[in-house]
Image (spheres, helix red, strand yellow):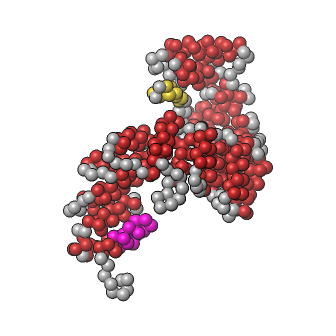
């Protein structure tokens, strides 16, 4: 067009800027911006200005977007929504909320942008609270609203709220299918929410009732089955996916499959699936797949194979993969391999208390108290502090959080009295605590009641209520 000598008008330039925004082509977008600045008649055009603010926001250049926004002579709901979305995406949700609060006119895109911002930044309670405010407004939520709402419920693992959100979804009449306004991702979000809330049957029910399914639908189910310890069901669905649909597995699918094999103890089958990734599906194994294989082999006690898998990785192993092997060493009481792995972990992350604690507990399990003391002294020398344990329980929509040795709860007397009675019953039944599962250098002199109470306080509170 430019080579033919045809000058673009406002709509053409705005369309090209929008294309740059979609592609995150910021270099080309700036070139067009420079062209706009040269022409006075384009410089103050509202449509072009909105497109530029949107482009910089989507390219994570929020300062440039804000500079343009502040100098716009005229603004509308599109301008304000773009800057709210930009701040939300740039992890400045507080600023996004301030801008949102100043908006005179808000459409559903504005609400969706802020709700998505809260969800993406882990502020799920705020996302839910904002949705409740939306319900009071004369604005109709869309499938994007419910997708973000369900993600917030999934991140909180709050089944009660998730079911309430599902009720809203049903009222909207979504069919979970592709089309002019595809809503299949709402169904996928529902599956993910139910699986993360350990409500596997509900997740499967949503999956089976979907009008259409895509790869994300199968992935959510396969990974969900694996995470909930139903490895055989995950593998059965994977085989169904290959046989019934034309979809091919991706990297997420294979993570679910390998995790399923690990939970089901299917070592040989897991090895075959790992080998088939590149051979049959054209997928190059990533770090997460190697971590799954280490977990699979480690659980089965094949520690040397797990170690060789790590050493053969085409990328540098991280603390997660070495940590998986160290946990397997503790499970199978291989102190020699455990010492080797702990050294590797401390090279990567010397300030992490996990390797010190696991290694000292392994020594404690073998009664090697001098080694326990040596590891703990090394830990103190390096200034590493073990984070205190934490557990919680939700009762009547209120969350009660307890730290180790916590005595702050208003019902502490009733809680510890109940625990004392339970520990006596457990002792009479032959229960003997495994002191290696606790802080080894402090646990040698502890009695059974103290060991139990630190873990069971939330359960005792739940029993009292």
Q: Is residue 23 visible?
A: yes
Residue 27 lies, in percent from the top left, at 39, 70
Residue at 37% x, 54% y: name it.
109
Check if residue 102 falls in the magenta segment: no
Q: Looking at this view, is 353 or 74 the one in front?
A: 74
Please say if 437 is above or below 61.
above
Residue 91 lies, in percent from the top left, at 40, 50
Residue 61 lies, in percent from the top left, at 37, 60
Residue at 66% x, 44% y: name it.
226
Question: For residue 214, which quarter of the picture?
Answer: bottom right
Residue at 55% x, 50% y: name it.
188
Residue 50 lies, in percent from the top left, at 30, 63
Left or right of 3: which side holds 397? right
Residue at 27% x, 62% y: name it.
68
Q: Looking at this view, is 279 or 185 the one in front?
A: 185
Which quarter of the image is occupied by the N terminus? bottom left
Please say if 183 is above or below 396.
below
Q: Looking at this view, is 270 or 108 the one in front?
A: 108
Check if residue 19 falls in the magenta segment: yes
Q: Is residue 87 visible?
A: no
Left or right of 88: which side holds 347? right
Q: Residue furthest bottom?
A: 4
Left or right of 127: which side holds 460? right
Q: What are the residue bounds of the magenta stretch?
A: 14-32
Q: Residue furthest right?
A: 268
Question: For residue 391, which quarter of the picture?
Answer: top right
């Amino acid at each position: 067009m430019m080579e033919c000598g045809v000058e673009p008008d406002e709509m053409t330039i705005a369309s090209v800027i929008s294309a740059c925004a979609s592609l995150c082509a910021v270099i080309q977008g700036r070139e067009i911006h420079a062209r706009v600045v040269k022409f006075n008649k384009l410089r103050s055009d509202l449509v072009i200005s909105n497109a530029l603010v949107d482009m910089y926001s989507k390219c994570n250049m929020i300062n440039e977007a804000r500079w343009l926004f502040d100098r716009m002579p005229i603004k509308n709901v599109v301008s304000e929504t773009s800057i709210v979305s930009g701040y939300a995406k740039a992890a400045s949700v507080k600023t996004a909320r301030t801008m949102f609060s100043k908006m005179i006119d808000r459409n559903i895109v504005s609400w969706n942008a802020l709700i998505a911002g809260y969800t993406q930044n882990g502020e799920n309670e705020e996302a839910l609270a904002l949705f409740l405010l939306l319900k009071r407004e004369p604005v109709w939520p869309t499938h994007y609203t419910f997708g973000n709402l369900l993600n917030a419920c999934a991140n909180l693992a709050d089944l009660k709220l998730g079911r309430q959100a599902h009720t809203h979804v049903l009222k909207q009449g979504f069919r979970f299918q592709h089309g002019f306004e595809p809503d299949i991702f709402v169904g996928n979000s529902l599956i993910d929410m139910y699986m993360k809330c350990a409500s596997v049957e509900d997740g499967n029910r949503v999956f089976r009732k979907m009008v259409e399914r895509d790869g994300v639908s199968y992935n959510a189910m396969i990974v969900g089955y694996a995470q909930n310890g139903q490895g055989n069901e995950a593998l059965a669905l994977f085989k169904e996916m290959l046989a019934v649909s034309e979809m091919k597995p991706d990297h997420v699918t294979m993570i679910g499959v390998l995790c399923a094999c690990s939970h089901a103890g299917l070592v040989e089958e897991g090895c075959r699936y790992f080998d088939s990734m590149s051979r049959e599906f054209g997928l190059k194994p990533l770090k997460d797949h190697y971590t799954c294989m280490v977990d699979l082999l480690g659980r089965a006690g094949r520690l040397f194979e797990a170690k060789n898998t790590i050493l053969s990785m085409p990328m540098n192993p991280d603390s997660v993969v070495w940590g998986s092997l160290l946990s397997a060493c503790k499970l199978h009481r291989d102190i020699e391999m455990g010492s080797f792995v702990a050294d590797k972990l401390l090279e990567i992350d010397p300030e992490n208390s996990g390797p010190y604690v696991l290694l000292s507990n392994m020594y404690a399990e073998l009664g090697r108290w001098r080694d326990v003391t040596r590891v703990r002294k090394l830990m103190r020398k390096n200034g590493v502090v073990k984070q205190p344990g934490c557990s919680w329980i939700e009762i009547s929509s209120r969350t009660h959080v307890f730290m180790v040795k916590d005595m702050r709860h208003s019902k502490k007397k009733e809680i510890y009295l109940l625990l004392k009675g339970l520990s006596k019953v457990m002792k009479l039944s032959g229960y003997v605590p495994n002191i290696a599962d606790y802080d080894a250098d402090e646990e040698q002199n502890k009695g059974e009641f103290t060991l139990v109470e630190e873990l069971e306080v939330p359960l005792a509170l739940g029993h009292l209520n």
